[in-house]
Image: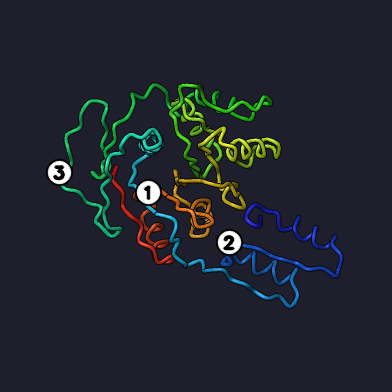
């Protein structure tokens, strides 16, 4: 709430409360200077209770990174991953993935790269090869923008998607850094027949509540969100968190992946990492004392 500019609102609410009261301040992280500052203003003789640590390993969350190039490449990776989840639910065997240590070198020799076949694209990293459907629309086209605008909660409460959507009960939460990217990405996923919704700060509170309800009840099973959803969103049984855009800092990463692997359940967090994200990713590894699995699809 502090990141979103609600500090003044919080203080106004506190001033309206009775002087004799019990005040609880809850935060997933305490590194933010705004948290400590507001705590000193609204708490008196406070006792700090820490459950675990920001640096504690997320033992129930399997954390992976996939090297990616540009937005188009990430879109194809995302569609592939979501289709893989659907294949698992249908009882089909998922293809084995190749995992490398997190400190494996980025460079790849030409001998490691297989020839590209029809409808197959290979990352310049040489580490990611995926089969993709022929691309018929551009995520920035007017068609996708129109589809994005039609996404926002209909009053009928009908689930998003069609009867031909991939059969998949696994819930996936996908994070982007920009609202426009969230709109475009959710439209693209619906184009590929996924039951996808969108959640970000430009939606009204009613629209946000509608989307969260649809996601919680399983009427949609893919939710594309900006960081507004990383704070306080508690939806049961989120199987996978995917960082389509790599988070801007340690706190954002911790908040995002914390949406899965809750209450002792197992969860999976996958981050798409470009060359520009590598140093930040390494810093998060050091801070959380976790070596992310390098995944090749």
Q: Which residue is at a point 50% across and 44% down the rendered structure image? A: 175
Quarter-of-image position of residue 138: top left
Q: Please give left or right for residue 3 compared with residue 169 in the image.
A: right
Above or below — where is 272 with respect to 45? Answer: above
**Which is more foreground, mark 2 or mark 3?**
2
Please tell me which of labels 1 and 3 falls first in the chain.
Answer: 3
* Whole-number angstrom distance, CA of label 2 to CA of label 1: 24 Å
For the N terminus, the image quarter is bottom right
**How many neighbours does mark 2 have within 10 angstroms: few (below 14), some (14-19), or many (20 or more)?**
some
* Whole-number angstrom distance, CA of label 2 to CA of label 3: 45 Å
Q: Considering depth in this image, is 232 or 137 the residue closer to the camera?
A: 232
Please tell me which of labels 2 and 1 falls first in the chain.
Answer: 2
Please tell me which of labels 2 and 3 falls first in the chain.
Answer: 2
**How many neighbours does mark 1 have within 10 angstroms: few (below 14), some (14-19), or many (20 or more)?**
many
Q: Tell me the residue that label 2 is attached to.
A: 28
Q: Position of residue 18 (x, y in %)?
A: 87, 65
Q: Tell me the residue that label 1 is attached to.
A: 273
**Which is more foreground, mark 2 or mark 1?**
2
Above or below — where is 142 with respect to 84? Answer: above
Helix, strand or loop at disc 2? loop
Helix, strand or loop at disc 1? strand
Q: Please give left or right for residue 236 compared with residue 38 in the image.
A: left
Above or below — where is 53 with respect to 266? Answer: below
Helix, strand or loop at disc 3? helix
Q: Tell me the residue that label 3 is attached to.
A: 110
């Amino acid at each position: 709430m502090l990141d979103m500019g609600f500090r003044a609102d919080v203080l106004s609410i506190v001033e309206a409360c009775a002087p004799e009261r019990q005040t609880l301040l809850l935060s997933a992280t305490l590194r933010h200077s705004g948290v400590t500052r507001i705590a000193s203003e609204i708490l008196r003789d406070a006792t700090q209770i820490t459950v675990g640590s920001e640096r504690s390993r997320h033992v129930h969350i399997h954390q992976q990174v996939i090297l990616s190039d540009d937005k188009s490449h990430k879109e194809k990776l995302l569609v592939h991953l979501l289709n893989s989840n659907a294949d698992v639910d249908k009882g089909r065997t998922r293809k084995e993935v190749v995992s490398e240590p997190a400190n494996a070198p980025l460079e790849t020799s030409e001998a490691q790269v297989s020839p590209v076949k029809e409808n197959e694209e290979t990352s310049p990293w040489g580490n990611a090869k995926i089969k993709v459907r022929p691309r018929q629309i551009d995520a920035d086209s007017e068609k996708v923008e129109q589809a994005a605008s039609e996404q926002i909660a209909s009053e009928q409460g009908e689930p998003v998607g069609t009867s031909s959507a991939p059969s998949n009960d696994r819930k996936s939460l996908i994070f982007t850094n920009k609202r426009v990217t969230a709109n475009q990405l959710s439209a693209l996923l619906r184009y590929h027949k996924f039951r996808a919704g969108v959640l970000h700060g430009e939606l009204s509170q009613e629209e946000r509540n509608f989307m969260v309800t649809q996601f919680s009840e399983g009427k949609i099973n893919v939710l594309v969100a900006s960081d507004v959803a990383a704070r306080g969103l508690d939806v049961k049984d989120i199987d996978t968190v995917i960082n389509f855009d790599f988070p801007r800092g340690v706190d954002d990463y911790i908040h995002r992946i914390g949406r899965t692997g809750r209450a002792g359940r197992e969860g999976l967090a996958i981050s798409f990492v470009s060359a520009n994200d590598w140093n930040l990713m390494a810093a998060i590894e050091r801070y959380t004392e976790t070596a992310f699995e390098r995944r090749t699809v």
